[in-house]
Image: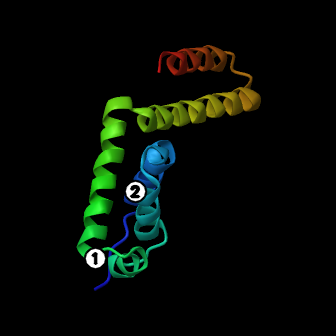
Amino acid sequence: MCRVIDMNDILERSLLYDFYGELLTDRQKKVYQAVVFDDLSPSEVAEEEGISRQGVHDMVRRCEKLLQGYEDKLGLVARFSQTKDLVAQIRQQAELFRKTGDVSCVSRIEHISMEIGEL
């Protein structure tokens, strides 16, 4: 059976793990990384870890729920994404200012930077 890989899903999992992965136990991190990032099958991980395939599957699901729960409470990934988007807007305005000399770009940059400060 061929799995369809959704790049947004991969990015979301990566960001959640980057921000909150250290809150998982060492064993949870090892199993989650092996299945999600190293693309090992639950059977391979189960054999390596000395647990059942279902145990691996359950642990990965539990880790995903934990990571999403942290995001739901803290919102660090959402803030990071918003800040990244706003910084891209600042760069666009700065480039426009360099090309055109339009001073209204400066006020737009100031407005965007205030938005970042409010996140």
76 to 19, vertically: above or below: above
Residue at image location 30% in from the left, 61% down from the top: 59
Q: Amino acid at mark 1?
A: Arg
86 to 108, vertically: above or below: below
List x then y, in percent, for residue 3: 32, 77
- Give the quadrant of the N terminus: bottom left
Crowding at label 1, few (<14), some or many (≥20) Cα neighbours within 10 Å?
some
Q: Amino acid at mark 2?
A: Asn
Q: Which residue is mark 1?
A: 53
Q: Which residue is mark 2?
A: 8
On screen, residue 5 versus residue 57, left or right, reads right
Answer yes or no: is residue 83 visible: yes
Answer yes or no: is residue 7 visible: no
> Looking at the image, is mark 2 or mark 1 nearer the viewer?
1
Crowding at label 2, few (<14), some or many (≥20) Cα neighbours within 10 Å?
few
Sequence-wise first label, 2 or 1: 2
Residue at image location 41% in from the left, 35% down from the top: 78
List x then y, in percent, for residue 80: 50, 35
- Judging depth in this view, the residue of 98 and 21 nearest the camera is 21
Residue 5's quadrant in the figure?
bottom left
Residue at image location 49% in from the left, 71% down from the top: 38
List x then y, in percent, for residue 116: 53, 21
105 to 64, vertically: above or below: above
Tell me the SS state at disc 2.
helix
- Judging depth in this view, the residue of 77 and 52 nearest the camera is 52
Residue 8's quadrant in the figure?
bottom left
Tell me the SS state at disc 1.
helix
List x then y, in percent, for residue 112: 55, 20
- Judging depth in this view, the residue of 5 and 54 nearest the camera is 54
Residue at image location 38% in from the left, 30% down from the top: 74
Numbered label tally: 2
